[in-house]
Image: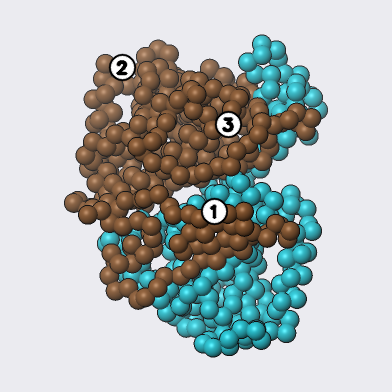
Amino acid sequence: MTRELDDLILRLRANERELGTWVIRTKGEVEDALAFERVIARYSGEDWLVNEIRHYFKRVLKRLDVTSRSLIALIEPGSCFAGALLELALACDRQYMLDGFLEEDSQEGEPAQIVLSESNFGTFPMGNGLSRLASRFYGDDDHVAKLRQETGRRIDAAEALELGLVTDAPDDIDWEDEIRILLEERAALSPDALTGMEANHRFVGPETMETRIFARLSAWQNWIFVRPNAAGPDGALRRYGTGRRADFDRRRV
Amino acid sequence: MTSNAEPAVEPQVSFDADPSSYRHWKLDVQGEVAYLRLDVAEDGGLVPGYELKMNSYDLGVDIELHDAVQRLRFSHPGVRAVVLTSARDRNFCAGANIRMLAQSSHPWKVNFCKFTNETRNEIEDATAHSGQTWIAAVNGTAAGGGYEMALACEQILLIDDNSSAVALPEVPLLGVLPGTGGLTRVTDKRKVRKDRADVFATRSEGIRGKQAVEWRLVDEVIPKRKWDETVAERAAEAVARSGRPADARGVDLPPLQRDESPDGIRYQHVEARYDRAAGLVEITVLGPEGTSPTPSNASTSWARGSGRSP
């Protein structure tokens, strides 16, 4: 699963630039997801392969964190956003959780539930060194501590909203309209402004060497790349190797 | 690239790679030490229009590097030190290919830099969390992205042959930044003083020999006659410090099974459906199935598409 998701992220980034919003769902049994959790938690210290898989999933989540697409998690009945897989939702810019069932659905089984586990409290740190929950509730350690006491328990939509784990929890009457309008509105916004805004909101708090590389260094570099002094016909990048010096616009910006 | 110049047609990119078909790297596993040697095929560019001279790289070279980092971790549990070096004397790596950069569209450059940055971080992650210490054996000049590749390693060894230097010539020669972590790692990781970092990053010929050590740009300069044995010694020291398990069996990473169509991509456990009219993709991740009491069970499931080697 981790390899496949990694490959998909890389392909979508490189080959599907016009698909600016990624809607992320999961499908499966919450209980099965948690059983794997426990193996990862129990053995990652002693089994080298479990450890490698944990770190690989960490790196894939980091790829999501620096992906310049709008990431929206939809948490519906039949999903399994539990523990490590809940990180996928927490990596998103927004999370929507259906409260109840849609009329056309079978209405069998349970409504959507999410489950916190130890994995959500530091197993998969972001580039800023914080867990996604600590980033989400930056400066509110009390709330993170409170959430820690909720691990292992199934949390329904109303409670997830109450705990600040989802952006909204529409019921079956509002769900389709709300999601449709949200996605339409998102697609109408400037893709460049969204990229900048999302990158700012995702990384709160402390800077690390890693966040400095992906923000301070990359953002300046990407600005320089569009400036005529580098990429224009008389810019240094294009003049290199021609024997002619670059002709700079000397005004500092 | 300015808007009035037409960028070369940029291809659909595949990230599949396998050591048996690397064009630009030679992976040589010798017991507990792996040697990864850069030997870029000049005619092996991912996009037409440039030649990868002087061991310079493009996205295709980095896709293979990313593959090597992954495989060393999963398929070679016995490897405890990785020596990153060049297959060529006097030329370690000249960095990202300049003609490639000059002809690429803005989004291509940005995506290229993001991926190469992620791969440098993976190298550091392997050193930090996998007991695989990466050592840069800089056996020739390392310029720009070449030096940045070395900076991602835990140790940098530079050959002392009166010509090989480390350099970040982007600002003085190209009017851009060493954007694959170069500026950042020089100050934050190597702890080079900021005024020296300023001198270094504006001196196109770079710095070599003792001064490179004094300025902390490299850890050690080694005379040519002692090169091979000293590199082997440093690797052995890293091996001795590693907590990698003895006698573990690696897992294969076979090619991913992937069903591509105009409407999306379907893997075994991940699915993507495109809605081009709405400008979005719907991604569904299938969770694990069945409760799994043992690590080997859990491992194979999580790394689905791979299995423990017999």
Let me know if marks 2 and 3 both belong to one chain: yes
Residue at point 59%, 75% (across, down)? A75
- Look at the image and give the colour of chain A: cyan
Q: Chain of mark 3?
A: B
The residue lying at 71 percent from left, 76 percent from top is A176
Q: Position of residue B276 (x, y in %)?
A: 70, 57
Under mark 1, the amino acid is Glu
Measured along the vertical axis of the image, is residue A117 above or below residue B108? Answer: below
Left or right: where B30 falls relative to B270: left
Asked if the residue at tag 2 contacts the one at tag 1, i.e. Cβ–Cβ closer than 8 Å, the answer is no
Sooner in the amino-acid sequence: mark 1 or mark 2? 2
Badges 3 and 1, same chain = yes
Q: Disc 1 designates what residue?
A: B260
Residue at left offset 25%, top offset 53%: B309
Q: Which residue is mark 2?
A: B224
Residue B21 at what x, y percent from top left?
38, 36
Q: Colour of chain B?
A: brown
User: Which residue is depicted at the point 37% across and 71% down?
Assistant: A36
Q: Earlier in the sequence, mark 3 or mark 1?
A: 3
- Tag 2 secondary structure: helix
User: In the rendered image, which residue does mark 3 sit on?
Assistant: B47
**Which label sits in the foreground, 3 or 1?**
1
Tag of residue A51: none
Q: Is residue B47 above or below residue A207?
A: above
**Sequence-earlier tag: 2 or 3:** 3
Quarter of the view holding residue A228: top right
Report how far apart the C-alphas of labels 1 and 2 lie in the structure.
Answer: 51 Å
Q: Chain of mark 1?
A: B
Which label sits in the foreground, 2 or 3? 3
B103 left or right, relative to A89: right
Using the numbered discs, state the Cα–Cα distance from disc 2 to disc 3 in whole angstroms. Answer: 37 Å
Amino acid type, callout 3: Val
